[in-house]
Amino acid sequence: MRDYLLTLCVTAAVTYLLTGPVRKFAIAVGAMPAIRARDVHREPTPRLGGIAMFFGLCAGLLTADHLSNLNSVFELSNEPRALLSGAALIWLIGVLDDKFEIDALIKLGGQMIAAGVMVMQGLTILWLPIPGIGTVALTQWQGTLLTVALVVITINAVNFVDGLDGLASGMVCIAACAFFLYAYRIWYSYGIEAAAPATLFAAILMGMCLGFLPHNMHPARIFMGDSGSMLIGLILAASAISITGQVDPDALKIFEGSTRQATHAALPVFIPLLLPLTIIAIPVADLVLAIVRRTWNGQSPFAADRGHMHHRLLDIGHSHSRAVLIMYFWSALIAFGTLSYSVHSASMWIVLAIVGLSAIGLVLLLLPRFTPRAPRWAESFVPPRYRRRRRRPAAAEPHGPGPGHPADDQTDVRPDAAEPEPVPAGVNGATALSALSGVHDRRKAGTRG
């Protein structure tokens, strides 16, 4: 655990320290697209944050290679090299897209090629555990197709959810944390060395996200862009493939006794083997709904719009930060709820806790629709949005309309309301580096196909 934590800290430190220079580089090369109609940020913001994240990945792998307890991962398995090869290819495609905005079909082809590169070097699904049947070996073509499909789905799911400041990096960090705990339990408790690469990948992925988050929280100073979102999506998929299709469930000794007993005993193990799908359940659901919505409206599945989950949270009245925190909450509930059930499946308290937290999440989700008003005596202790509105007396308007005017009874103001400050032109404090135009009119901004 100490070596994993050291690798995580080195990855986070390198990513954090490189993000500042990468931001200046992105501004210098003009990797700052104009604000589009579907965007929620108000100022042009540089991309290419994936450059810092990729070098953080390289630093993490290099550090692990020089640690005595993790060096065996590189000696006994070719998976770290396969991951680095696929990550380098998908990162180059993302960098080109951040600068030149390449076609969506070209990106899809690049994602499939990156997945194929990893398959050729041994990072592929060899078998699948099926409850009631046991371990089913896959042919080479079956394993290749399933691996490529999982990589492409995960990459695009993470890419689709990257729409608010800090959303994608935070959700992937939560997913990687839950996945790390499960993979470490398989590796340490059961003594299965085949789970060590997945544990290492999850630790490095956490470090990449934690190092980038301080620069990406609202208001973001830099975006990870496709070079970052596709990169972390590929690493998350590689972790899932490594432990789901490489670790033999027979080594866990769960298929003993009768078929019914074996299936019941294997249930807590099968669920976390599908943990990569549960931890990206929200991004995958958003991806499926987006494809159905666009196809139903006669649009291309790759056409961008403002119908994603985070856009809907903003539309119903949530602030930017609160929408991100709500998405964090649901991601953590699904990931850690599944992880907890895998450890103590017989405990009813876990199920009750998940149900209770889900109810709390629904209340928070619908809070803008039912905004409570605090009593008079508690108004000084709550934010202004929860205070009762006070009617302005007629005597306070010396130059206002006369008695009987329709506007007399329609003026409700909050005593603490303040005039909004104008938004300065520039790029989040980057005006010292280059002269930039003001904010583009969103009505004139086009959408990217």
Image: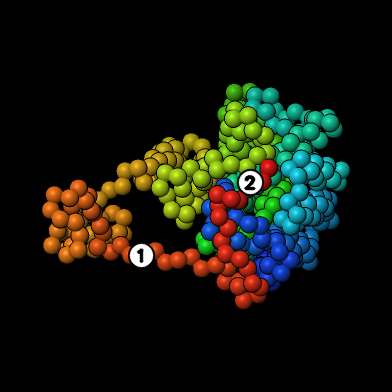
Q: Nearer the viewer, residue 263 or 18?
A: 18
Q: Residue at x 67, y 28 (%)?
A: 130
Q: Residue at x 60, y 73 (%)?
A: 431
SS class, disc 1: loop
- Relative placement, left or right, of 385 versus 48 is left
Q: Nearer the viewer, residue 343 or 254?
A: 343
Report whether residue 82 is seen.
yes
Q: The residue under label 2 is which amino acid type?
A: Thr
Q: Looking at the picture, how far across and down is residue 59, in whole percent?
A: 74, 65
Q: Which picture quadrant has residue 63?
A: bottom right
SS class, disc 2: loop
Q: Looking at the picture, how far across and down is residue 286, in whole percent?
A: 57, 39
Report whether residue 224 is seen.
no
Q: Residue at x 70, y 36 (%)?
A: 249
Q: Residue at x 55, y 49 (%)?
A: 443
Q: Looking at the picture, how far across and down is residue 134, in whole percent?
A: 70, 28
Q: Nearer the viewer, residue 187 or 382?
A: 382
- Relative placement, left or right, of 186 versus 393 is right
Residue where numbered disc 2 is placed: 447
- Relative placement, left or right, of 40 versus 141 is left
Q: How many marks?
A: 2
Pointer 1 with pointer 2, Cβ within 8 A: no
Q: What's the colour scheme? A: rainbow
Q: The residue under label 1 is which amino acid type?
A: Glu
Q: Looking at the picture, how far across and down is residue 411, in whole percent?
A: 23, 53
Q: Quadrant of the C terminus?
A: top right
Report the Cα–Cα distance between label 1 and label 2: 32 Å
Residue where numbered disc 1 is placed: 419
